[in-house]
Image (tube, rainbow, N blue to C red):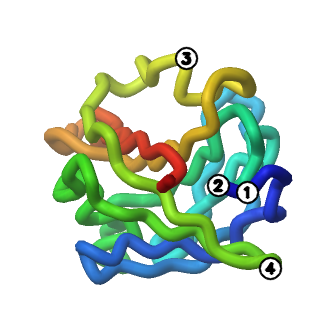
Amino acid sequence: MASVPLGPPVTVRLPTLGTAAAVVPVDVGPDRALGVPDDPRLVGWWQAGAQPGSAAGAVVLDGHVDTRRDGPGALFRLTELQPGDPVVVGTAAGELTYVVVEVRSHPKGQLPAEAFDAGGAPRLVLVTCGGPFDRQLRRYTENVVAQAVPAR
């Protein structure tokens, strides 16, 4: 693991799923929801969180599972990740490999607070929508969260 941040993430790869995407910065909006890139092929990096290689805190990446217009998003297959699978985050300074430790679903609005914690052990948190699609609300009922730790 790097001892200093490698800088903002610019790419993310999920090799076991054959998925790769560019990463762009996102913020929390006025509604206190984490922003998601409009383009479902992109993944967002919560820029108030940790950078890859930081000694502590969560590097939070999020993206659409899919959109009606564009179909599957970059994180469409996130639920298929298994403990032990690698996740490779690229920065302008190099790449850092993380290893998945868990993948869980949470009801919308109930993401675990530690997913956004600036302290604690360094980790990567990937977030997308999941669960059943509520046609009346026009959204998924859950969030899928994959947590990973730096590879040794």
- Amino acid marked by disc 1: Ala
Instruction: Measure the alpha-carbon separation of dots 3 and 4.
Output: 29 Å
Which picture quadrant has residue 57? top right
Picture residue at 55% right of the left edge, 17% below the top: 113
Which picture quadrant has residue 107? top left
Q: Which residue is mark 4?
A: 92
Closer-to-camera residue (6/9): 6
**Secondary structure under the numbered disc 1 in the rendered image:** loop
**Image position, residue 104 (x, y; %):** 26, 33
Q: Which residue is mark 3?
A: 113
Q: Which residue is mark 2?
A: 1
**Image position, residue 130 (x, y; %):** 25, 44
Q: Which residue is mark 1?
A: 2
Q: Is residue 6 left or right of residue 83?
A: right
**Secondary structure under the numbered disc 4 in the rendered image:** loop
Between discs 3 and 1, the one toward the N terminus: 1
